[in-house]
């Protein structure tokens, strides 16, 4: 009797286990089916402020990341800027034929100055191509340190995520510091001397007729023929996790100009729709809106224009110019990387026209601030603008 009971118990347990296994397998298959059925999400969402209003740009599932370079990968010679130091830099012009794109990464082949060197400090920057020389100020400026540890060369890389709209070219630059004006050296490929290089030092900026300086870039651009989305949905909210649908964009269009009724900081996300199925949301992107409720592009009216800071990087004073077509209250504040306000100029009334503003790199008490990246928050009426400035002592 005992043996029979045990046998029946085992059969019952086995039946229960079989049902559990079947249930688990069914759940897994159902989950996989949902995963396979869900469209690929938007690869990257970014944006910028235009006339105080958010303009979003995104990259669909068909977007491709590509490498831009003009060297053959072999350095025939290590070089540096042989001139009086004044923001010594080597620059390379890149071409990218797309309505808009993001520079995801900049890299350079660097080498130690001496075999005994243990480390090299320098900076990589992305700059706008103005169509003339010199190029525009840095849109990104990243300080780097390479520890050599017996290495003869290394590709130093830095993520940038700089958005370009309507620009068919841009500049990548390597900057030396005054403390080490010859270290590191940068690789030069002499297999091609057609010339995309420029050299900058002591206020001079001129083309270099030698080989290719070994600076490379990675860019992300849309590939509309490879995009099979039915539409894109744009979401907005004051919290990155609580966003609501505000617009449906037809397939083939990858940007949206938003005009919220109320000013403030807004988080945006974008999803792809394919065969009536919505993808996972994109990354959240934060932009500030003036909240005028008026599309200034349609009205062909620029209420306020703020120039890029100059020079940037700077060592003693940085200048920026503001132009307004009416009287308004204008002021600005400076923040460090920790988000701490280190300097402010209270708002006051300014008449219509062009006005210049200067910051000397000091805090509220007149103390000299250390080298580094700072953020300029400029307020004009109800609009807020942000700029980045780099202080190099």
Image: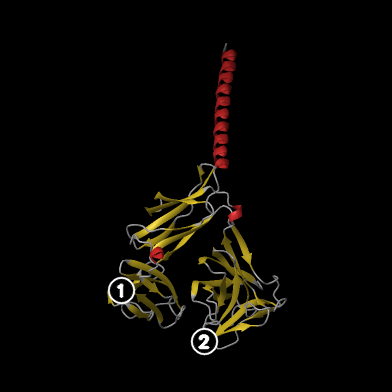
Q: Is residue 373 visible?
A: no
Placement of the C terminus among the 4 image quadrants: bottom left
Q: Position of residue 90 (x, y in %)?
A: 59, 79
Which residue is at the far bottom? 84
Vertical side of 287 occupied by 173: above or below: below
Nearer to us of marks 2 and 1 is: 1
User: Left or right: where does residue 15 sit relative to residue 343?
Assistant: right
Which residue is at the far right? 191
Q: Is residue 305 visible?
A: yes
Q: Quadrant of residue 85?
A: bottom right
Vertical side of 342 occupied by 257: above or below: above
Disc assigned to residue 258: none
Q: Position of residue 375 (x, y in %)?
A: 40, 71
Which residue is at the far top? 1
Give the residue at mark 2.
Answer: 203
Name the residue nearer the viewer: 49 or 324. Answer: 324
Of mark 2 and mark 1, the one earlier in the sequence is 2
Placement of the N terminus among the 4 image quadrants: top right
Circle 2 packing at 10 Å, graded few (<14), some (14-19), many (20+), is few
User: Left or right: where does residue 97 sit relative to residue 369?
Assistant: right
Give the residue at mark 1.
Answer: 326
Residue positioned 45% across, 55% down in the render? 284
CA gap, disc 2 to disc 1?
36 Å
Q: Position of residue 39 (x, y in %)?
A: 55, 45
Tell me the SS state at disc 2. loop
Tell me the SS state at disc 1. loop
Residue positioned 49% across, 52% down in the render? 282
Q: Position of residue 225 (x, y in %)?
A: 61, 54
């Amino acid at each position: 009797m005992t043996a029979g009971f045990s046998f029946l118990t085992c059969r019952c347990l086995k039946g229960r286990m079989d049902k559990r296994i079947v249930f688990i397998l069914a759940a897994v298959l159902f989950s996989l089916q949902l995963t396979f059925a869900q469209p690929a999400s938007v690869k990257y969402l970014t944006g910028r402020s235009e006339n105080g209003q958010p303009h979003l740009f995104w990259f669909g599932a068909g977007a491709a990341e590509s490498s831009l370079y003009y060297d053959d990968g072999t350095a025939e010679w290590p070089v540096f800027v042989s001139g009086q130091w004044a923001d010594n830099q080597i620059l390379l012009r890149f071409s990218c034929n797309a309505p808009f794109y993001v520079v995801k990464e900049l890299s350079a082949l660097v080498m130690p100055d001496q075999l005994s060197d243990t480390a090299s400090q320098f900076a990589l920057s992305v700059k706008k191509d103005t169509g003339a020389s010199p190029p525009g100020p840095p849109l990104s400026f990243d300080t780097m340190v390479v520890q050599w540890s017996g290495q003869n060369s290394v590709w130093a890389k830095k993520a940038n995520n700089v958005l370009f709209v309507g620009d068919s070219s841009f500049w990548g630059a390597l900057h030396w510091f005054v403390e080490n004006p010859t270290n590191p050296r940068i690789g030069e490929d002499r297999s091609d001397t057609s010339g995309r290089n420029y050299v900058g030092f002591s206020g001079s900026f001129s083309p270099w007729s030698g080989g290719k300086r070994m600076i490379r870039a990675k860019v992300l651009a849309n590939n509309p023929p490879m995009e099979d989305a039915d539409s894109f949905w744009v979401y907005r909210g004051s919290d990155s996790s609580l966003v609501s649908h505000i617009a449906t964009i037809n397939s083939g269009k990858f940007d949206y100009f938003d005009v919220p009724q109320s000013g403030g900081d807004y988080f945006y996300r974008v999803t792809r729709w394919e065969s009536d199925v919505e993808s996972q949301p994109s990354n959240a992107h934060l932009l500030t809106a003036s909240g005028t409720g008026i599309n200034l592009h349609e009205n062909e009216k620029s209420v306020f224009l703020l120039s890029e800071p100059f020079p940037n990087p700077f060592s003693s004073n940085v200048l920026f110019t503001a132009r307004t077509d009416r009287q308004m209250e204008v002021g600005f504040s400076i923040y460090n990387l920790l988000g701490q306000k280190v300097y402010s100029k209270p708002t006051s009334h300014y008449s219509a026209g062009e006005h210049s503003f200067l910051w000397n790199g000091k805090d509220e008490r007149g103390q000299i601030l250390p080298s580094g990246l700072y953020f300029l928050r400029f307020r004009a009426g109800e609009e807020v603008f942000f700029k980045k400035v780099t202080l190099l002592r």
